[in-house]
Amino acid sequence: MSDIDLFKGIAPDEAERVLALGELVVVGAGAELFHLGDAAESIYLLVRGRLRLTLPMQVRSREENVLVEECSAGQTVGWSALTPPYRFTLTASAPLEAEAIALSREALNAYFAAHPATGYAVSFNVSCVIGHRLQLFQAMWLREVQRMVEMRCA
Amino acid sequence: MEMLLMGVCLSVLGMAVVCLAFGAATRDLGNPPVAAPGVEKEMVRAAASPARFFVDPPALPMAAHAGVPIEALLLQIENHVRLEHAAAECFLQSPSASLLHSRTISAFVN
């Protein structure tokens, strides 16, 4: 339970109660958990396997899903379900069979309204993960810009 | 007497050979052959073209990915993303300008 990034700082029994709100989803090898642009109603805690998060890119006039990030067990994907406009901004697919627990926004909001301390802790964890991802991609973006500057000045 | 006649015959024969050779050498002097314009331009171009010392000039670096199969190119992109992800993680662990702009070994950009 302590490996799940969403439940850091939360007592195990409380985390169990939150987990009980969700349902297990099995993603077959090569199948998609969610697709770019779909309505985001649930976030997913990955409990087994790996997920590839991809974005479409034109490669030689062909649209290809290019890897942006990989997630492993214990990580949470689908933050778009907690932030407006509630649309997935990536596609998640499983290279091999994977399992995830789907937690719907509606169920989480109702539970957090009744248990604000848990709601605060989970929201804090969500903000930490989103902040980390923002810093990570900011650094990656700047490295690419630096390369473009070097190419232009060469 | 026989020797004298033989000498005269050889002299006449030698003179005839010299005359034929002179005539052949000077036959077309007044009307020299004119090369076709295209051939002449080709000769000038060949003379003016840069020397090629056994090898063609090296290809441009950006053309290096042109011949790579698309599957290999996608793998290169994936590998590049993973390396950039790792480099960005290193930067976040210990932020500094040198770590932010550390060099990559990614084949996609090298």
Image (cartoon, rainbow, N blue to C red):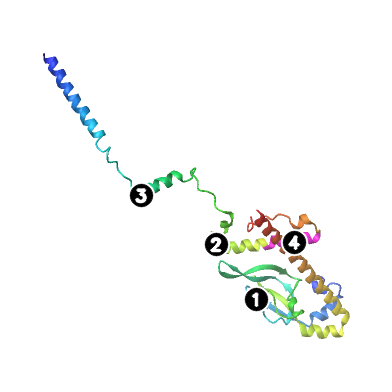
For label 2, the residue is B69
Viewer-nearest residue: A153 or A42:
A153
**Does label 2 or label 4 sit earlier along the sequence?**
2
Indicate the quadrant containing the N terminus of chain B: top left, top right, bottom left or bottom right: top left
Q: Is residue A4 visible?
A: no
| Nearer mark to the viewer, of 1 and 2 | 2
* Chain letter of the residue carrying label 4: B
What amino acid is found at the position of numbered circle 2 in the picture? Pro
For label 4, the residue is B88
- Residue B109 appears in which quarter of the rendering? bottom right
| Mark 2–mark 4 CB contact (< 8 Å) | no
* Residue at left offset 71%, top offset 59%: A146
Q: How far apart are marks 4 and 3 (CA)?
A: 65 Å
Q: Is mark 4 on a helix, strand or loop?
A: helix
Indicate the quadrant containing the C terminus of chain B: top left, top right, bottom left or bottom right: bottom right
Q: What's the magenta region?
A: B81-93
* Residue at left offset 62%, top offset 61%: B76
**Does label 4 or label 3 sit earlier along the sequence?**
3
**Does label 2 or label 3 sit earlier along the sequence?**
3
* Chain letter of the residue carrying label 3: B
